Image (cartoon, grey):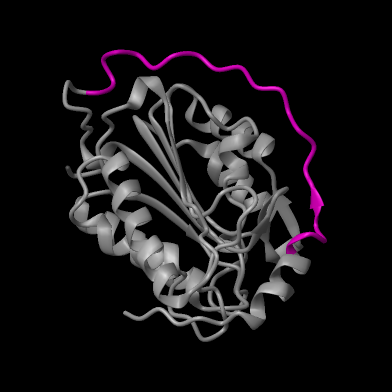
Amino acid sequence: MSVRTAFGILSFFLAAACTPTADAPPAVTQGTVAASILSGDGSLPANQWHAVLIAGDSATPAFDNGVEEMRAKLRRRGVVDITAYSADPASVPRDRLSSSANVAAALRGGGSGAKACLAYMTSHGDEAGFFLRPDRRLLTPPTLDRLLAEGCGALPTVVIVSACHSGTFIDNGVRRPNRVILTAAATNRTSFGCGADDEYTYYDWCLLHAFDEAVTWSDLAASTKACVEGLERRKGVRPSLPQLFVGSEVANLRLPGR
């Protein structure tokens, strides 16, 4: 796998991501995670995870590539409840397009019998949210918070947002005691590797390479951040500053199969 830069795309996708209509912020209430959900070491059987994987744009193959590789890794770990979405209407049926309606339904679904949730999202973005090209809308932090609360409730929940300015999902209301949130960039920073010729974004490339060795989600975030910082230093670009939030109830939450 390789990572190649394409700086000319940045101005385009930042402009494009600002145009969709953002969803209205909802009100959310949330309970606490039952002590019996996690084992003492923070692990859960892999077949008890519900995973939703979202490629929000098709302007580059990097996003679909990230989703497909994540799906393969989760399957190898024993996760069976995986639903993937693409923005390319030529490659998936309508019910697997990453439209706002389909994504909302998937996140709200929660999975029958699941005891933990994972949302992996990769696309363009701005400080208002995550870009979904099929209907040119933004998935905003308050809306994601509501959908996760409806679908996963107080279950251990992991959110990975790989996009420019994705730190907004930590800074604007998605934080809950039962959630771990990893983002590719700080709210005021862009991320890199999402050009038309890129195989993966920088963040996705690093995350996927670190996935097999990591034990906890905090481990994965630390290894991914170090990898991204190394790539950015070599390319001489402004640091994207990947972010991490770990809720108090899931401090030692392990990856599926670990």
Q: Picture quarter containing residue 141?
A: top right
Q: Which residues are magenta?
A: 17-38
- Name the spot of residue 200 as percent of width and height, x first: 43, 73
Q: How many marks?
A: 0
Left of 257 or right of it: where is 66? right
Residue at x 62%, y 74% (from the top left corner): 89
Observer-nearest of 82 and 250: 250
- Name the spot of residue 24 as percent of width and height, x first: 80, 37
Residue at x 51%, y 25% (from the top left corner): 176
Observer-nearest of 169 and 39: 169
Observer-nearest of 162 and 96: 162
Residue lying farthest to the bottom in this orientation: 197
Assign the magenta stretch its main secondary structure: loop
Quadrant showing the C terminus: top left
Visible residue check, residue 194:
yes
Left of 226 or right of it: where is 18? right
Visible residue check, residue 71:
no
Above/below status of 115 relative to 106: above
Residue at x 55%, y 73% (from the top left corner): 194
